[in-house]
Amino acid sequence: MTGEFLIRQLADGDWDAVVALEHDAYAADGLSEGREALQSRVRSSPETCWVLEQHGAVRGYLLSLPYPPLRCPDLAAPEDGAFASDNLHVHDLVLAEELRGRELAAKLMEHAQEQAVERGFAQVSMVAVRGSDILLRFYGYRAHREVALPASYGRRAVYMSRPVG
């Protein structure tokens, strides 16, 4: 990524910033899962988790992991291990509030798509929360309303997927 922003792999020293960003984004809606759960997801696939850096500071992140199609992690529980799957599940994408609306989320999603192609995944999935399913349709995601999601996602959550490429 050019300019003042850099997308790089999440490192151990990034956790305080990641946890703070996650809390700021989700705590008010009861969707914050905390450090232990977030770290468990990264442990299962560290090579598919990235941060958005600006002038040396973590200003956003995207956590993804291989996960069986039509399933997703439960926000209320950490991961027990890794899955072998051709589905890359984007578990979480957060930007610092003042960076929202600048197409940086799209840049992170494009990066995840490129990495999914390079790593041989067949599809990318995610759970849309707080009405973001409307936007994700523009990026080629299809809603799977038949998928029963863990209650931890809230009542408006929708499982979505799209083919890689």
Image: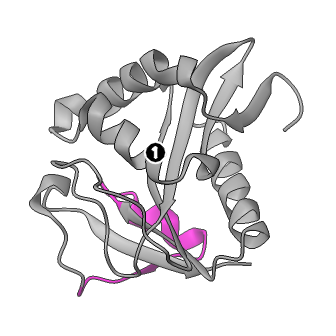
Q: In this view, does 141 lie to the left or right of 151?
A: right
Residue at the extreme bottom: 146
Residue 2 image position (x, y, % from top left): 89, 33
Residue at 56%, 17% (x, y): give it.
Answer: 13
Q: Is residue 80 left or right of residue 59?
A: left
Q: In which quarter of the image is the C terminus?
A: bottom right
Decide if residue 57 is in sight here: yes
Secondary structure, mark 1, is helix
Is-magenta flag for residue 63?
Answer: no
Residue 145 image position (x, y, % from top left): 26, 82
Residue at the extreme front: 81
Residue at 63%, 83% (x, y): give it.
Answer: 122
Dividing the picture into quadrants, the one containing residue 153 is: bottom left
Coloring basis for residues: one colour
| Residue annotated with mark 1 | 43
Residue closer to the observer: 116 or 99 = 116
Residue at 64%, 76% (x, y): give it.
Answer: 121
Residue at 72%, 12% (x, y): give it.
Answer: 56
The amino acid type of the residue labelled 1 equals: Arg
Dividing the picture into quadrants, the one containing residue 8 is: top right
Decide if residue 92 is in sight here: no
Give the residues in magenta: 128-146
